[in-house]
Amino acid sequence: MAASFRPVLVLTLLSFLAFNAHSQLSTTFYAKSCPNVERIVRSVMAKAVAKEARMGASILRLLFHDCFVQGCDASILLDNAPGISTEKNAFGNVNSARGFEVIDAIKVQVELQCKATVSCADILALAARDSVNLLGGPNWAMPLGRRDSRTANLAEANNLPAPFESLSQLASRFAAKGLNARDLTVLSGAHTVGFAICTAFRSRVWGGEPNIDPSFAVSSRQTCPANGGDTILTALTTPNTNRFSNQFYKNLVARRGLLHSDQVLFNGGATDAFVRKYSTDASAFSRDFAASMVKMGNIGVLTGRQGEVRLNCRKVN
């Protein structure tokens, strides 16, 4: 009896500690200490997206890649330094993660008004939220109060979800972060904007996968040759409107998902029903996407006296 009770006690304690950390986040966290922070973030992001719509997708991707590596703690923003191997050099980030200079610009403006108050982790969370909304997607109240890590984790960053994985592999990765099949499906909808390099989907459009529309495979080969052109960019969702919508799911139903890891969401598995729902109900997609973004934004957060509030997002204080 004692042996079987101990794991339950540990899990209960861990769950309590996780809940306690998350409960310290609040949508009014900076109401007194930095009341204009959301306006500042929105202003800089609006200019960045107006200059290059793709930047919205890039900032959103940064948040995903940050939260899936030791939690939403801005570790992805750290540069190489003694004792720190930057996550920017991970397989899924090198030569593809971008938007760091936009986060830097936001941080400079925030520091001018609120010295050593707003974390880089919160700035990234707000910037990703605003990116979605500026591209025509939903808006939501973002809980704040995250602290910044003093470490990075290159090894974990090298194990981010990959575009070649199966549904079961993806589901396991998301479950390990406390995210379920609905979260997996709706958060993948972020691929309604943004681009992928040729190496991320070459095997799908040239390899004769059975769950791909033949005409889509042929057209995709025009921007991704069988050999060479590894870094050529192709829109994740076509037609590419740079607008946040449910077109991604319509494409999956038509077997026109660009990435293998996207199309597995609609391939006779447990997530098919979610894909069908979102393909015909844009409001449901927007509502569920916002909810899952808040949920993802709670992964492994540092709060209270944990971590620090970096003065420069690229290095520890």
Image (spheres, helix red, strand yellow):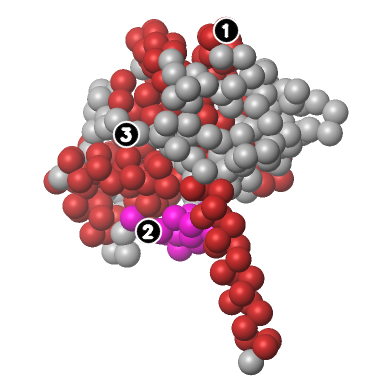
In the depicted structure, whether residue 101 falls above or below residue 167: above
The image's mark for residue 140 is: 3
Amino acid type of the residue that numbered disc 1 sits on in the rendered structure: Leu
Would you say residue 137 is visible in this rendering? Answer: yes
Q: Which residue is mark 2?
A: 181
User: Which secondary structure, mark 2?
Assistant: helix
The image's mark for residue 112 is: 1
* Residue 199 appears left or right of 290: right
In the depicted structure, whether residue 301 falls above or below residue 59: below
Mainly helix, strand or loop, the magenta region?
helix
Circle nearer the viewer, 1 or 2: 1
Which range is magenta? 167-182
Pointer 1 or 3: first along the chain: 1
How far is mark 1 from mark 3, CA to CA?
26 Å
Pointer 3 or 2: first along the chain: 3
Neighbours of disc 2 within 10 Å: few (<14), some (14-19), many (20+): some
Q: At which x and y percent is residue 212?
A: 30, 49
Q: At which x and y percent is residue 117?
A: 59, 22
User: Which secondary structure, mark 1?
Assistant: helix
How far is mark 3 from mark 2, CA to CA?
21 Å
User: Which secondary structure, mark 3?
Assistant: loop
Residue at 52%, 29% in the rendered image: 122
Amino acid type of the residue that numbered disc 3 sits on in the rendered structure: Trp
Q: At which x and y percent is residue 195?
A: 41, 28
Question: Disc 3, disc 2: CB below 8 Å?
Answer: no
Amino acid type of the residue that numbered disc 2 sits on in the rendered structure: Ala
Q: Is residue 172 magenta?
A: yes
Where residue 312 sits, quadrant-wise, is top right
Circle nearer the viewer, 3 or 2: 3
**The one of 235 and 312 positioned closer to us in this rendering:** 312
